[in-house]
Image: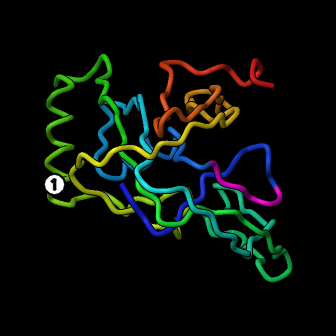
Amino acid sequence: MWGEAALFTRPELKVERVSYPVMTPSAAVGVLESIYWKPQFRWDVVAIEVLAEIKQFTQRRNETTDLASLAEAVSGRRRVDTVANRVQRNAVCLRDVAYRIHAHAVPDKNSDKPEAAYRDQFRRRVTRGSCFSQPYLGVREFSAFFGDPDDRPAQPITEKLGLMLHSVDHSTTPPSFTWFDAELVNGVLRVPEQGIPATGAA
């Protein structure tokens, strides 16, 4: 997975967006699902390797504080006023990124296929360059590209990254989040099987 730019926003920095130096597990799941997804399985990310030198740049972005609810967006009852509610925010982004994602396709209890079937179909789609939607690196304007893995070594970077989003559970209302204490070790971010509930992370 590679791209010209990426932004994986740290949650504690809400006004001025600052990226983690590595792709987050939730962003990796989004990339994998854009290539191959079925309701019969989920992606379980176990590690992310940083293959390119970490380089940063700043960008000023126009954003709106006027957000329509899902019901309003579907019905078209209200227009979003971007002119009156526009704000400019700086973002610290990543440039010329490349990652190698390690993940398992975990079938659910209703699946009629083994993990190998989903994995092999995913690999064929990667080789063909097929995807359901264009994957992106944190924000939609930063498109991602993908291909078969090579044997490039990970960058020799070791750094503690602090709390990072592990997963989002959309079966609860509102959605619940889990976190983990992230660390790059020799360019590899290892993701634990389970995260810490949000109440324990505060």
User: Magenta span has 17?
Assistant: yes
Q: Position of residue 129 (x, y in %)?
A: 21, 61
Q: Position of residue 151 (x, y in %)?
A: 24, 45
Q: Considering only vertical position in the picture, is 157 above or below 4?
A: above
The residue that label 1 is drawn on is: 127
User: Tag 1: Cα neighbours inside 10 Å, few (<14), some, or many (≥20)?
Assistant: few
Viewer-closest of 12 and 117: 12
Q: Position of residue 91 (x, y in %)?
A: 72, 65
Residue 178 visible in rendering: no
Q: Quadrant of the C terminus?
A: top right
Secondary structure of the magenta portion, mostly?
A: loop
Spot the residue most to the right.
Answer: 84
For this view, does 140 lie left or right of residue 11? left
Q: Quadrant of the N terminus?
A: bottom left
- Identify the image quadrant of residue 168: top right
Q: Considering only vertical position in the picture, is 193 above or below 31?
A: above
Number of numbered labels in the structure image: 1
Viewer-closest of 84 and 125: 125
Residue 198 visible in rendering: yes
Amino acid type shown at disc 1: Thr
Viewer-closest of 134 and 110: 134
Q: What residue lies at 63% left-to-right and 69% top-to-bottom?
A: 76
- Mark 1 secondary-structure assignment: helix
User: Magenta span has 160?
Assistant: no
Residue extent of the magenta highlight: 15-20
Q: What residue lies at 29% left-to-right and 30% top-to-bottom?
A: 105
Q: What residue lies at 24% left-to-right and 48% top-to-bottom?
A: 149
Q: Considering only vertical position in the picture, is 121 above or below 72?
A: above
Q: What residue lies at 49% left-to-right and 58% top-to-bottom?
A: 137
Spot the residue most to the bottom.
Answer: 83
